[in-house]
Amino acid sequence: RYSELRLLKEVSAQLLKRGISTFHSRLCKNDGLFLVHPAVSQALAENRPVVALESTIITHGMPYPHNLSTAKAVEAIVRTEGAIPATVGLLQGRVHVGLSSEELDYLARSKTSLKVSRRDLPYAISKGLCGGTTVSGTMIAAHRAGIHVFVTGGVGGVHRDGENSMDISADLTELGRTPIAVVSAGVKSILDIGRTLEYLETQGVCVATFGSSMNFPAFFSPESGFTSPYHVNNAEEAADLIAGNLSLGLQSGLLLAVPIPKEHAAAGQQIENAIQAALAEANVKGIRGRDLTPFILQKVNELTRGKSLQANIALIHNNARVGSQVACALSKRMQ
Ligand code: PSU
Ligand code: MN
């Protein structure tokens, strides 16, 4: 499948050079519902590195204007590292892979955007809605476009008490069924990290920590105390892992966990205390389902007087650097 894809892309690149873009648009499935930005489809057709980015973090994960400045900074980092950013989002019921700066601005200011996971896509499309795609929603769109690497802050997981509530993020099942590498800072301690790792194993997701540690990172802190199944030392090894997954033709994804840089992890314990308080408040207020993660994020930011937001932004920048280097290393193997 891996070499098939490479052949498809080669043919497509040659056609593109001659000004024929039909094959290339078929490759990118520009079929009306999924719109691939020309800069993204061109890069894909030429086998240049592309990094997908999500947008729930913009619509539901951070307050304005930090959401917009972070989204723009992350795209700039991807470009500096030599890759093309493709932020995924829903506009008027169409899934965009790659947003213009005006479109990013629109999503960042919008107060009516839906949080769009796999299960929300049919509704959002039928009603012509705008929305921020979660990790699961973004994986679907990015994979359809032919992107192999996707950078985010944190993925969803099994919530604490998930064995009773059955609140398990659709991100985990998506990782089990969609072959794309998700680069994140691990799983937040608002979640049950042990059960999240167990669930990922059940779903057949290859999980590796980036760097020399075997510890799976916990978003705000570099170590969760849980052992990561694997680790990769650098971007080259990460690219080997992704290439292996693609060559096997496994339909499952891959989770690359990048620990938060030590200098930004300082507020870790204070943030942990805030998480405990936020969880207790969510419980008292009966906040559940899709509203839970955004509620906790906002509450923790309030309680830490912005420290958690600063750490969040720093780790996303770091993930964007690492993810772009991985995408570059992977694209070299496909030249
Ligand atoms: N974690 C964060 N920030 C976020 C999210 C998670 O630190 O913005 C978002 C991501 O888009 C993720 C989604 O895919 O929340 C998971 O939501 P849920 O737990 O409802 O599945
Ligand atoms: Mn949930």
Image (tube, grey):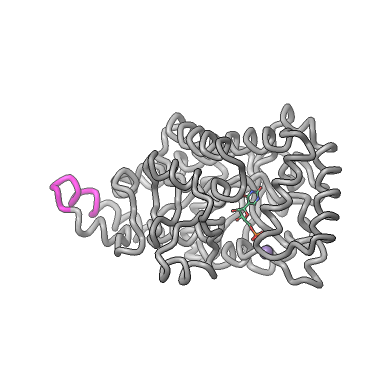
> Can residue 131 be seen from the camera position used here?
yes
Please give left or right for residue 55 compared with residue 94 in the image. right
Q: Residue visible at 45% across and 57% down?
A: 130
Q: Main secondary structure of the magenta part?
A: helix
Please give left or right for residue 119 compared with residue 204 in the image. left
Q: Residue visible at 45% across and 51% down?
A: 88
The x, y position of residue 50, in whole percent, is 41, 44
Please give left or right for residue 193 compared with residue 329 in the image. right
Query: Which is nearer the eye, 273 or 331?
Result: 273
> Can residue 180 be seen from the camera position used here?
no
Q: Residue furthest top?
A: 263
Q: Which quadrant does the N terminus fall into? A: bottom left
Q: Quick check: is 15 in the magenta stretch?
A: yes
Q: Which quadrant does the C terminus fall into? A: top left
237 relative to 131, above or below: above
**Quadrant hosting ligand 1:** bottom right
Task: Name which quarter of the figure residue 34 lies in.
Answer: bottom left
In the image, the segment drawn in magenta is 11-20
Query: Which is nearer the eye, 105 or 324?
Result: 105
Q: Residue visible at 78% across and 36% down?
A: 304
331 relative to 142, above or below: above
Q: Residue visible at 38% across and 60% down?
A: 94
55 relative to 198, above or below: above
Q: Residue furthest left?
A: 18
Q: Quick check: is 224 in the magenta stretch?
A: no
The x, y position of residue 332, in whole percent, is 40, 41
The x, y position of residue 3, in whole percent, is 37, 58
